[in-house]
Image (tube, helix red, strand yellow):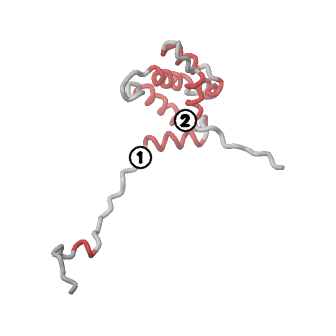
Amino acid sequence: MEPHFSSPPSMESLLAEAVAYGNDENESLEAKAQKALECPCIADLRNGPCGVQFSESFSCFLKSTSEEKGSDCVHPFVALQNCIKANPNAFSKDILEEAEEKKEEEPAQEYKIIPPIWSRESQSPKSKL
């Protein structure tokens, strides 16, 4: 039987695991954020070349109380994105692709809609008798 090699977990799944790790209803947002940052699942991100930027953006997101969670964390996320771009070799291809997807959403292509012939025919009732 061949060993099964799974692909590395996605950034999204790592962050979800860290949030769950720090989720204790009886603690303040600050304490939850600190505990989530201590999760071993994100140790590589915390200790890498963008560790400070990652920690600041993740912590800001966890503590965010704005209606659209994290919308008040633009500056830390931009700093993290710039660091990731400056250190591409420090991140897996999956993480780099996720960052690219979020930043470069292509504009939707414009299609010309041509109605079918039957819809352009006269709408007056025709007697088939």
Q: Which mark is residue 26?
A: none
Residue 54 x, y percent position in the rendering: 53, 26
On screen, residue 27 versus residue 125, left or right, reads right
Identify the element where label 2 is drawn: helix
Identify the element where label 1 is drawn: loop
Q: Nearer the viewer, mark 2 or mark 1?
A: 2
Q: Which mark is residue 12?
A: 2
Relative to 53, say whether 128 is above or below: below
Disc 2 to disc 1, C-alpha distance: 18 Å
Say which label, 2 or 1, has the lower sequence index. 2
- Looking at the rendered structure, the kind of residue marked 1 is Glu
Outermost residue toward the left? 124
Outermost residue toward the right? 1
Relative to 91, say whether 105 is above or below: below
Taking the spot 22% from the left edge, 73% from the top edge, the residue there is 120
Check disc 1: other Cα within 10 Å, few if <14, some if 14-19, many if 20+: few
Outermost residue toward the bottom? 129
On screen, residue 59 versus residue 5, left or right, reads left
Locate the C terminus and report the quarter of the image it occupies: bottom left
Relative to 116, say whether 57 is above or below: above
Give the quadrant of residue 8. top right
Residue identifier under label 1: 105
Check disc 2: other Cα within 10 Å, few if <14, some if 14-19, many if 20+: few
Relative to 110, say whether 22 is above or below: above
How many numbered discs?
A: 2
Residue 117 x, y percent position in the rendering: 27, 75
- Looking at the rendered structure, the kind of residue marked 2 is Glu
Taking the spot 60% from the left edge, 23% from the top edge, the residue there is 21
Taking the spot 18% from the left edge, 82% from the top edge, the residue there is 127
Residue 79 x, y percent position in the rendering: 46, 28
